[in-house]
Amino acid sequence: QVRLVESGGGLVQAGGSLKLSCTASGDIFSIPRMAWYRQVPGRQREVVAGIAIDSGPNYADSVMGRFTICRDDAKKSVYLQMNSLNPEDTAVYYCYADVVLPLVGGGWPRGDHWGQGTQVTVSS
């Protein structure tokens, strides 16, 4: 069973920084894509940043230049460095992984997996 565990959320003042971490565990063959999403109550979950195993990172316009996503495939982990935080960044942040499981029968099971979410609160 695949599990994603996040850490690093918290309360920070505007202009401050936080770093989120997410580590996947389980019988995993590969993780083609990892990403961070965030959600505010009453609004849809939105992608913040994503990174694929074979391409560079991409970012939402709202965080471009302030957030940096990176991954460590040896650790099955993804990180989100968040700088120059502002109150509009307040949300629950979720880790996402597109996971390929080891070969079973004639195919490679693949599916979406989510972390439990970590709260980020930016005070003005």
Image (cartoon, rainbow, N blue to C red):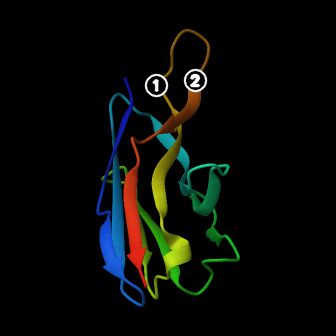
Looking at the picture, tell me which residue is in the foreground, 44 or 60. 44
Looking at the picture, tell me which residue is in the foreground, 10 or 112. 10
Check residue 102 in the rendering and tell me which mark sits there, or answer none. 1
* Relative vertical location of residue 110 with respect to residue 48 in this rendering, above or below: above
- Coordinates of residue 94 in the picture (x, y in percent): 47, 50
| Residue shown at the point (50%, 82%) measured from the top left | 86
User: From the image, which quarter does the N terminus lie in?
Assistant: top left
- Coordinates of residue 50 in the picture (x, y in percent): 59, 61
Check residue 108 in the rendering and tell me which mark sits there, or answer none. 2
In this view, the residue farthest toward the top is: 105
- Coordinates of residue 59 in the picture (x, y in percent): 64, 71
How crowded pointer 1 is (Cα within 10 Å; few <14, some 14-19, many 20+) is rated as some
- Coordinates of residue 89 in the picture (x, y in percent): 52, 72
Marks 1/2 in contact by CB < 8 Å: the verdict is: yes
In this view, the residue farthest toward the right is: 61
Element type where label 2 sits in the image: loop
